Structures are given as structure tokens and as C-alpha cells.
Image: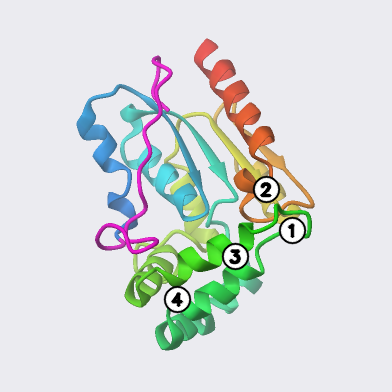
Amino acid sequence: MLWPSPQVLVEECREVGALGGGAALGADGAEVLALDTGPVIAVGHSMGGQVVNLLAGRHQHAVHSVVALDPAHGADESEAEVVPARLAAYRTHGARAAAAFVADSFAPTSPPGLATAHVRTMLGTPDHVVVQAYAGMYTDADAVGVRKQSEEYLRHRICPSLTVWTAGEPATWENENLHVRGSRVDHWPDTGHYMHEERPRRTIKLIEKWADSTLED
């Protein structure tokens, strides 16, 4: 979303669903800056949550605020312990292993067919992209998915932020690490990882109210 004009730009994640080219997270979203749009409200989900926060930290002048939906950061010690095994599974089985993980990411009340659609999308993702994307989030030298590194990269985010978590513990953790006036963390219990598709109207209202409130400041 662009400020102050009510336009929307969509950045396609690289090669997800067999589109695009590599999996360098730090580069995703940077193409928007070349459009000379002015400050944006950067909205991202999951891996996209990392992308918009990296964009805000590395290009502070270009981001007015951030909305991160169940972002792929803040992995605690127990979650970090399973990262090596999960990465090994992705290297061995590629998109099939990732599809199994995706299939377990939905609430019982999610719309019919939503899980099937995402599993099919994941199965259409090249195996090497699954590996590169996961490693880029959690195990590469500059990865920010594990909690200690997450706290460091979030300190570079100097704009207001709205983060929505589906789990209570990471919501509490991120709320304790807020340092910019106007930022907040919401918790949506009983909601699956793909919150914006399970609860689209609620998500749209949330982003609209956020945009209105932050642009008034």
C-alpha cells in the first residue's frame, strides 16, 4: 500500500508456485523502491513478514509502517531445535515435505478447499526453492528467523508496526520487544497460519483501520 495514495502494489515471492527466480529474501520487495512511490505501508504474511520487516530496517526512508501477519520470525528455542531436521527433510523430499507442513497449518474452521489450494501451490514450487527459502529464513549466515536474530533485526525497524500472531507466546514476546510509539501486537486465537484467507473481512478491516490511524499521525 502506498502513502498517501490509496494504491496497492503486490510483490510476488520468488518462484513460489513456480514463479520468478531465486530466494534471496533481502532483495524481495526492494523492487518497489525503484518505482519512486514514496513511503509505503508494507504488508506481508509468513515469509513475507520477514520481507517487509527487512525492507523497513534496510530502507527506513521508504516504509511508512509495517503490517506483519503471522511472520516467520521469533522462533523460540524449542522451535529452533527442529529447524535442522526440517531443513534436511526439505533437502531430501523437497516440496512434498513442505506440503505436509502446510497441510497442518489450518484451523478446523478454515474455508473448504483452502488447505488443498495451498498444498497444490506448494507442490508446484521447485524443490530447490523450498530449501533456499527455508534456509534463508532460519539457517543462512544472515537469517533472522530465530529469536535472538529476530530481536536484532526488529531493532532496525523504526517505523510503527502492527504484528498479528495466531499463537499467544510469540505475541507476548514481540509485544515485549516493541520500541516504536504507535506499534502494537494482536493475537488471533483459533485461527490458522493463513489468517488473511481464513478471515479475509477481518483482515481487510484491520489493515484499513491501521492505515487510517497511522496516516493521521
Q: How far apart are the alpha carbons under marks 3 and 2? A: 13 Å
Image x and y of residue 35, in percent? 22, 29
Q: Amino acid at mark 3?
A: Thr
Q: Which residue is mark 3?
A: 116
Q: Tell me if mark 3 has few (under 14), some (14-19) or many (20+) residues whose alpha carbon lies within 10 angstroms of its own.
A: few
Q: How far apart are the alpha carbons under marks 1 and 4? A: 22 Å
Q: Which residue is mark 2?
A: 198
Q: Which residue is mark 4?
A: 95
Please give the range of residues in magenta.
1-23
Image x and y of residue 76, in percent? 62, 65
Residue at (31, 49) in percent of width and height: 28
First in sequence: mark 3 vs mark 2 = 3
Q: Secondary structure at mark 1?
A: loop
**In the rendered view, would you say 41 is above or below 94?**
above
Q: Which residue is mark 1?
A: 107
First in sequence: mark 1 vs mark 3 = 1
| Image side of residue 33 versus residue 206, left or right | left
Q: How far apart are the alpha carbons under marks 2 and 4? A: 23 Å
Q: Tell me if mark 1 has few (under 14), some (14-19) or many (20+) residues whose alpha carbon lies within 10 angstroms of its own.
A: some
Q: Is residue 148 visible?
A: yes
**Within the image, what quadrant is residue 176 found in?**
top right
